[in-house]
Image: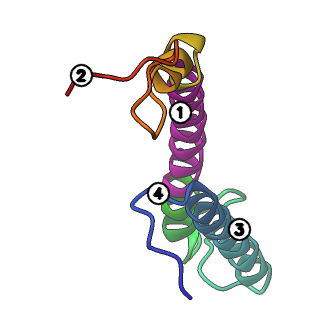
Amino acid sequence: MTSPQSKSISFAKVIVFFAVAFGIGLGLCGLDYFLAARGIGKRTIEYGVGPLDGVSLVVMILSAVGLILTTVLWIVVAIIRGITRRGADSPQSAEAANDRSPTGDNADGKKDDQ
């Protein structure tokens, strides 16, 4: 038997996606450094622009921003869910649920007039 699909966002999967993208950006930086050490793409100045500097910088910035925003959103959603669940488990709602039994009796044992 399969479980029904949940309409909530899987924040863990989004975090993993952005973390992998950030790792790819770091890898591109390493590749750019390797290419520069071989004399590919860099000029003679010490801090010249390599062939992958722009791409790796964009990937790292976008993934870092995504990681930060997703983590903050994950925390906010967890707090909101905790508050709403705590409110649903209050003693007042439990008393309201116990006011009626499945047999139609009130909490004091008397029958309802329907």
Q: Mark 1 and 4 residues: CB-CB less than 8 Å, in contact?
A: no
Q: Magenta residues, as a range?
A: 62-87
Q: Please, is residue 73 above or below residue 85 in the view?
A: below
Looking at the image, the residue that sits furthest to the left is 114
Looking at marks 2 and 3 on the same chain, the residue that comes earlier in the sequence is marked by: 3
Q: Dot 1 corresponds to which residue?
A: 81
Q: Secondary structure at mark 1?
A: helix
Q: Secondary structure at mark 3?
A: helix
Q: Secondary structure at mark 4?
A: loop
Q: Secondary structure at mark 2?
A: loop
Task: Specify the amino acid type for callout 3.
Answer: Gly
Image disc number at residue 23? 3
> In the drawing, does residue 25 fall left or right of residue 110?
right
Between 82 and 42, the residue placed more toward the observer is 82
Tag in front: 1 or 4: 1
Task: Specify the amino acid type for callout 1.
Answer: Arg
Asked whether 79 falls inside the magenta stretch, the response is yes
Q: Dot 2 corresponds to which residue?
A: 113
Q: CA distance from mark 3 to mark 4?
A: 23 Å
Task: Specify the amino acid type for callout 4.
Answer: Ile
Give the residue displayed 45% in from the left and 74% down from the top: 4
Tag in front: 2 or 3: 2
Q: Dot 4 corresponds to which residue?
A: 9
Residue 6 picture quarter: bottom left
Looking at marks 1 and 2 on the same chain, the residue that comes earlier in the sequence is marked by: 1
Between 21 and 105, the residue placed more toward the observer is 105
Q: Mark 2 and 4 residues: CB-CB less than 8 Å, in contact?
A: no
